[in-house]
């Protein structure tokens, strides 16, 4: 099956928002999604974009059973390691179930890696839920390192009231 990978455009945000919700359902956390295509447009295509995104598209001949031609995406952004330098963090990599196993996920991830190398990044980082064995196996087969197992890192987060409380402690 032929598909293309290209940089997302503002008009893709409705499809990206749809796929974000599909991914959240797969990850058993649909109630966690609080943004819409409007925030995606603002945050990814404004004067100072917070993220970049790639979309995978198939032809009309291969559109999904629901009529979609945008069938996958990868959302990523730049961060910095004080030990290693420029880094890309891949927030999401998603391919609709009926299009998995056709090389689309691999192409999306490889394109993120290519962009990272073009920007002189030394690492591509991401997180995977511990129960998501198919994705974990896919990443490990491609050469990713499991830092939880190898180095013992924990991925932590402040949000909601905890973030508010911490911010109030600032001088």
Image (tube, rainbow, N blue to C red):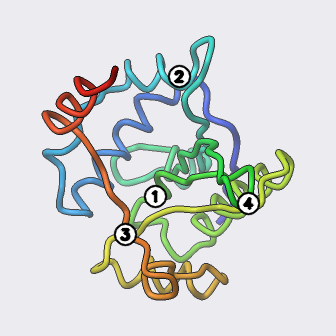
Which mark sits nearer the N-terminus, 4 or 2?
2
Q: Are marks 4 and 2 in contact (CB under 8 Å)?
A: no
Q: Are marks 1 and 3 in contact (CB under 8 Å)?
A: no
Closer to the observer: label 3 or label 2? 3
Using the image, tell me which numbered label, if any, was put on residue 11: 2
- Residue 109 is situated, as x and y percent measured from the top left of the image, at 64, 62
Q: Secondary structure at mark 1?
A: strand
Report the Cα–Cα distance between label 4 and label 2: 36 Å
Question: Which residue lies under the disc numbered 3?
Answer: 154
Q: Are marks 4 and 3 in contact (CB under 8 Å)?
A: no
Q: Determine whether, in the image, residue 58 is placed left or right of residue 69.
A: right
Q: Quadrant of residue 21?
A: top left
- Residue 34 is situated, as x and y percent measured from the top left of the image, at 22, 33
Report the Cα–Cα distance between label 4 and label 3: 19 Å
Closer to the observer: label 4 or label 2? 4
Check the image and report above or below for 51 versus 22: above
Q: Are marks 4 and 1 in contact (CB under 8 Å)?
A: no
Question: Which residue lies under the disc numbered 4?
Answer: 84
Report the Cα–Cα distance between label 4 and label 1: 27 Å
**Residue found 78% across the figure and 53% down from its top:** 121
Check the image and report above or below for 73 versus 34: below
């Amino acid at each position: 099956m032929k598909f293309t990978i290209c940089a997302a455009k503002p008009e893709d945000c409705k499809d990206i928002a749809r796929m974000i919700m599909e991914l959240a359902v797969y990850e058993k956390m649909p109630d966690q999604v609080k943004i819409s295509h409007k925030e995606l447009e603002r945050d990814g295509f404004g004067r100072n974009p917070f993220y970049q995104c790639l979309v995978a598209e198939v032809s009309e001949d291969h559109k999904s059973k629901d009529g979609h031609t945008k069938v996958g995406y990868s959302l990523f952004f730049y961060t910095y390691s004080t030990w290693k330098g420029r880094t890309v963090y891949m927030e999401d990599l998603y391919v609709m179930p009926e299009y998995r196993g056709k090389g689309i996920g691999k192409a999306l991830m490889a394109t993120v890696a290519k962009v990272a190398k073009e920007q002189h990044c030394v690492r591509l980082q991401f997180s995977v839920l511990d129960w998501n064995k198919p994705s974990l196996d896919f990443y490990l087969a491609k050469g990713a390192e499991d830092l939880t197992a190898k180095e013992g890192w924990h991925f932590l987060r402040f949000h909601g009231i905890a973030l508010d409380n911490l911010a109030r402690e600032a001088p």
